[in-house]
Image (tube, rainbow, N blue to C red):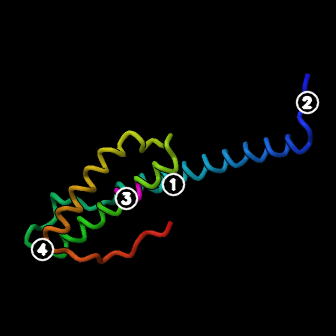
Amino acid sequence: MIRPSGILLGILLTAVSVQAASAADCNADAAKLRRAETELPKLEVAPPNDRQIVCITLETNVLFARRLAAHVQQCPRSPYAKSAETWAKTGSNYAAQFSSKGCKPAIKPYRG
């Protein structure tokens, strides 16, 4: 039977703890995304004649889609992996509307 040396054992334990920390970070980030998703403004209820509200609604949803995409890239096993493609399409659609309506960015970028 081959026994790992102290150095090899240390490397293996470090790798396992890094994976565990990464999984915890992914779970915490997924929980934050879940809360943020429940608070997203709905374009369907934004007053169509109030350009400012429509622009902020579009921008908020575009930024959420980007944040979700970044999360799934870092955490491919996230519960959000299944909805990432749908959110990418939604984000692209909202970004196109944001541009076509002449909206200007008003929200500071998310910095984690």
Circle nearer the N terminus (2, 3): 2
- How packed is label 3: few (under 14 Cα within 10 Å), some, or many (20 or more)? some
Q: From what the image shows, is residue 58 above or below residue 9?
A: below
Query: Is 40 situated above or below 16?
Result: below
Residue depicted at 20% across the width and 67% down the height: 98
Q: CA distance from mark 3 to mark 1?
A: 14 Å
**Residue 47 locus on image (x, y percent):** 12, 68
Q: Which residue in the structure is indicated by mark 3?
A: 66
Mark on residue 50? Answer: 4
Question: Could you tell which of marks 1 and 4 lies nearer the N-terminus?
Answer: 1
Mark 2 or mark 4, whichever is nearer to me:
2
Mark whose residue sits in front, 3 or 1: 3
Q: Residue at x 14, y 74 (%)?
A: 51
Q: Are marks 1 and 2 in contact (CB under 8 Å)?
A: no
- Type of the residue with mark 4: Asp
Tag 1: amino acid: Asp
The amino acid type of the residue labelled 3 equals Arg
Disc with the residue nearer the chain's start (3 vs 1): 1
In the picture, residue 55 is in which quadrant?
bottom left
Magenta region, residue range = 64-68
Mark 2, residue position: 3
Q: Could you tell me which secondary element the residue under label 3 belongs to?
A: helix
Q: Nearer the viewer, mark 2 or mark 3?
A: 2
Say if the magenta span includes residue 13: no
Residue at x 80% of width, y 45% of height: 11
Q: Position of residue 60 (x, y in %)?
A: 30, 65
Mark sitting earlier along the chain (3/4) = 4
Q: Main secondary structure of the magenta part?
A: helix
Looking at this view, is 5 or 107 the one in front?
5
Q: CA distance from mark 2 to mark 4?
A: 70 Å
